[in-house]
């Protein structure tokens, strides 16, 4: 599902990720305005199965989540699983973008010098 962040802020979200630092993902989700009902953190590079998606859905329902929020990396790994089509709680991807707020031109010059 897609939507702008402002339209889903304050919603009850259950997190699922298979990344190196799931605590950082949870922190980003909180900063984005989600109310976290729980999370399921798998090891980095986790290969999702139908059972994994069923477990995530079961936990999201159990904890009253309005949505399940995952990373772009994890969404790609889950998108072709049949359980995703049967999901009673919608899945959303929290897109994270890096931006430099100070000294952007200095950072860009250093990047160019590295090439």
Image: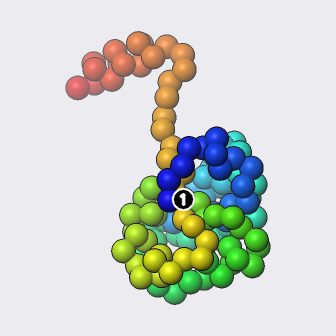
When asked about the image quadrant of residue 31, the answer is top right
Q: Residues within 10 Å of mark 1 (few under 14, many from 20)?
A: some
When asked about the image quadrant of residue 104, the answer is top left
Q: Secondary structure at mark 1?
A: strand
Where residue 68 appears, as percent x and y from the top left, is 61, 65
Which one is in front, 74 or 82? 82
Where does the C terminus fall, quadrant-wise?
top left
**Is 66 left, or right, of 48 in this rendering?**
right
The residue shown at (74%, 50%) is 10
Mark 1 lies on residue: 92
Question: Compared to 101, does 3 lie above or below?
Answer: below
Question: Compared to 102, does 57 lie above or below?
Answer: below
Give the residue furthest to the bottom: 51
Where residue 32 appears, as percent x and y from the top left, is 66, 43
The residue shown at (49%, 13%) is 103
Question: Compared to 40, does 100 lie above or below?
Answer: above
Question: Compared to 38, does 88 lie above or below?
Answer: below
The residue shown at (64%, 64%) is 67
The answer, for residue 38, to whether it is visible in the render is no
The answer, for residue 90, to whether it is visible in the render is yes
Give the residue furthest to the left: 115
Where residue 22 appears, as percent x and y from the top left, is 60, 58
Q: How many marks?
A: 1
Which colour scheme appears in the figure? rainbow
**Is 45 left, or right, of 61 in this rendering?**
left
Where residue 81 appears, as percent x and y from the top left, is 40, 79
The residue shown at (61%, 71%) is 89
């Amino acid at each position: 599902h897609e939507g702008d962040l402002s339209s889903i802020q304050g919603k009850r979200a259950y997190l699922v990720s298979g990344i190196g630092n799931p605590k950082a993902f949870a922190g980003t989700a909180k900063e984005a305005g989600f109310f976290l009902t729980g999370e399921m953190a798998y090891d980095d590079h986790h290969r999702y199965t139908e059972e994994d998606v069923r477990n995530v859905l079961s936990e999201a329902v159990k904890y009253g989540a309005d949505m399940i929020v995952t990373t772009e990396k994890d969404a790609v790994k889950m998108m072709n699983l049949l359980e995703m089509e049967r999901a009673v709680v919608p899945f959303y991807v929290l897109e994270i973008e890096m931006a430099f707020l100070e000294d952007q031109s200095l950072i860009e010059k250093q990047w160019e010098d590295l090439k």
